[in-house]
Image: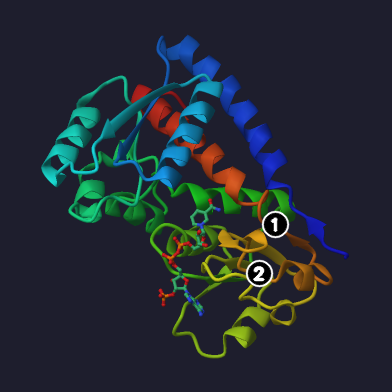
Amino acid sequence: MTAEIIDGKAFAANLRASIAEDVAAFRDAAGRTPGLAVVLVGDDPASAVYVRNKGRATREAGMESLEHRLPGSAGQDELIALVEQLNADPTVDGILVQLPLPGQIDERAVVAAIDPDKDVDGLTTTNAGRLANNMDGLAPCTPLGCIMLLKDQLGELKGLEAVVIGRSILVGKPMAQLLLAENCTVTIAHSKTRGLADVVRRADIVVAAIGIPHMVKGDWIKPGATVIDVGINRTADGLVGDVDFAAAASHVAAITPVPGGVGPMTIACLLANTLTAAKRREGIA
Ligand code: NDP
């Protein structure tokens, strides 16, 4: 194996430590603690674990974690009323509604109710529009983490060919926007793309956000490319990514492992977004 393994876990730990320092400085300047409100509807065990982990990471960074739980039978109006209450609460800087929501609730209506300046998941159309227009906003946490890893690994991204596989609102589309903002030449591939292997072969940077274990084969990837594997797939062999890691690692320059690559960056970027939102609300640069 020749590839450098990109250690997202270590990068995320450093980022969290530096956020904790910035949180202390924020407290001195603003006289209050940044607050992240997380809303969990129902008792889906995976969601409960995510919410618990987010709460712990928030507290470890010195921020306030406010958890709100609603029963799985909660109605859309009840949830939107809670979101509006959090919008109006001056101690809340970030609002995260844990998805997926129970079937009776329209996720888009709930996300649309979140104040875009507190939308630390970056899911509102306002923040998508800001991202597309190079305006200050809040970008979704996972692609934000990916771009940080890429800039750390490669430095200047200008002019590089980037292929993003996947076009979800959560990952693929904002990833493409962030790469474009770094002056990459960006291609977005998806399930209807023809000749995907040849499209991927052009790339200096491959970002795979598909959700199919080991779909991206080693020989699709140009020697010397940098690979960011966003996929988290549970298989009989444990957690695996969307890229055939062993085959790619023999000739790429660098690749994120699964687990231990992009995953840890997502929570760290949630904390980063919460601090960014808090600073903007207080007018702190
Ligand atoms: P979605 O299911 O919303 O999107 C998947 C995308 O992959 C779609 O755009 C789809 O295309 C595309 N796709 C599906 N099949 C193919 C195919 N055969 N060829 C090319 N493209 C294909 O998933 P997400 O974006 O939410 O997540 C993607 C992966 O990333 C998942 O494994 C998820 O678990 C993981 N993830 C990891 C996170 C982390 O913290 N590391 C955070 C978020 C997600 P089309 O639009 O045409 O249907």
The residue sitting at 32% across, 38% down in the picture is 40
Instruction: Label 2, secondary structure: give it.
Output: loop
Residue 283 can be seen, yes or no: no
Pointers 1 and 2 in contact (C-beta within 8 Å)? no
The amino acid type of the residue labelled 2 equals Val
Report how far apart the C-alphas of labels 1 and 2 lie in the structure: 10 Å
The amino acid type of the residue labelled 1 equals Thr
Cβ of mark 1 under 8 A from ligand 1: no
In the image, 226: left or right of 284?
right
Instruction: Residue 256: give its label.
Output: 1
Q: Residues within 10 Å of mark 2 (few under 14, many from 20)?
A: many
Residue closest to the eye, 261 or 160: 261
In the image, 11: left or right of 180?
right
Residue closest to the eye, 270 or 30: 270
The residue sitting at 84% across, 70% down in the picture is 250
Residue 143 on image: x %, y %:
52, 54
Residue holding disc 2:
243
